[in-house]
Amino acid sequence: GMDISPEAIRYNKGFNAFVSGDAANIPFSHDAFDVVVSQWMIEHVDRIDDVVKEFHRVLKKGGSLVVVTNSKYHPMMFLSSILPTKLRDWMKLRIFPSYIDEDTFPTYYRFNSLGKIDELLSNAGFEKKYASYTGSPFFLFNKFLFKLSELYERVTDLKLLRLMKMHLVVHYVKP
């Protein structure tokens, strides 16, 4: 696993090997990996073109890039994209329970629609295998809000509203 934050690495129990690094300058050689997975990171990247080039550089020929991120069309993400960071931080402290103690990073939402993802990854030399808006109920800490989010997920299952799902999941390959 790799994260820009050494503190975040210590709390991630999903990996047994870690490196602290910047995705715009991945500290590995060319053609080092069969798979690169980016989860809920790219919306926080200012230099997205550099990051995409790095993903391509470190993948072996035939390697897979899997990206999971938030859709900029989901109401919470849209609101987050237009609010100043300090206001988002203030709101987060009042909405979410105190045990959620993660930083709120600046968001750019340059890569958070299927059209933009396809444009960026295709221009970088990747081939699309799979791309979809998908969702999951959120607000697990509040029964009423969780039920409301379940209803929202059912409504956004309608084809015309699918882009308003919470997440995007894509799989691209380096030819």
Image: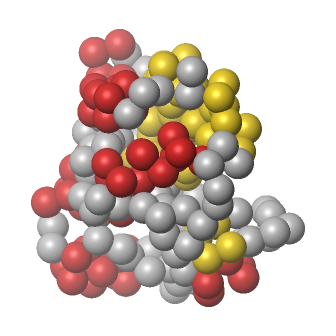
Is residue 44 at all visible to an observer of this figure? yes
Residue 77 spot, x, y in % from top left: 29, 52
Colour style of the rendered protein structure: secondary structure
Left or right? Give the position of 88 relative to 83. Answer: right
Front in this rendered view, residue 97 or 71: 71
Specify the farthest residue to the right.
16
Residue 44 spot, x, y in % from top left: 36, 62
Residue 60 spot, x, y in % from top left: 67, 36
Left or right? Give the position of 92 relative to 39. Answer: left
Q: Is residue 5 above or below residue 55?
A: below
| Residue at 41 percent of width and 53 percent of height | 51
Q: Quadrant of the N terminus?
A: bottom right
| Residue at 45 percent of width and 40 percent of height | 167
The image quarter in which residue 72 lies = top left
Front in this rendered view, residue 108 or 24: 24
Q: Is residue 100 above or below residue 29?
A: below
Specify the farthest residue to the front.
30
Front in this rendered view, residue 94 or 75: 75
| Residue at 57 percent of width and 21 percent of height | 175
Is residue 146 at all visible to an observer of this figure? no
Question: What is the number of callouts on the image?
Answer: 0
Q: Is residue 129 above or below residue 75?
A: above
Left or right? Give the position of 24 relative to 14. Answer: left
Specify the farthest residue to the top.
159
Residue 132 spot, x, y in % from top left: 46, 24
| Residue at 13 percent of width and 60 percent of height | 82
